[in-house]
Image (spheres, grey):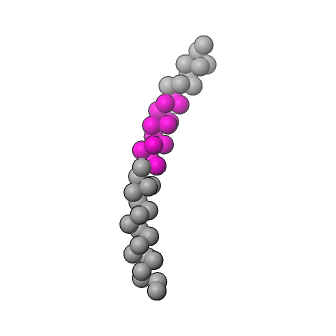
Amino acid sequence: MQATPDLSLPSPVPAPIDAALQASSRVFDIAATALPSRLAH
């Protein structure tokens, strides 16, 4: 009973995490460029 959830969890989890990391990195890049421009104006 424990082996089945353990095997099913690791597979779907890392992919969303990687996608979230890439999305967050893009968000940080956008924020890093957008915030200074707003402050400058």
Q: Is residue 36 left or right of residue 1?
A: right
Magenta span main SS: helix
Q: Is residue 28 magenta?
A: yes
Position of the C terminus by quadrant: top right
The residue positioned 57% from the left and 25% from the top of the image is 35
Q: Is residue 26 above or below residue 9?
A: above
Seen at 46% across and 83% down, the residue is: 2
Seen at 42% across and 80% down, the residue is 4
Q: Is residue 2 above or below residue 15?
A: below
| Viewer-nearest residue: 7 or 28 | 7
Q: Residue at x 48, y 43 (%)?
A: 24
The residue lying furthest to the top in this view is 41
Q: Residue 40 placed where, x, y %?
A: 59, 15
Q: What residue range appears in magenta?
A: 20-32
Can you name the residue that lies furthest to the bottom here? 1
Tell me where residue 37 appears, x and y as whole percent. 55, 19
**The magenta stretch spans residue 7:** no
Q: Position of residue 31 (x, y in %)?
A: 53, 31
Q: Specify the quadrant of the image occupied by residue 10.
A: bottom left
Q: Is residue 40 left or right of residue 3?
A: right
Q: Position of residue 18 (x, y in %)?
A: 41, 52
Q: How many marks?
A: 0
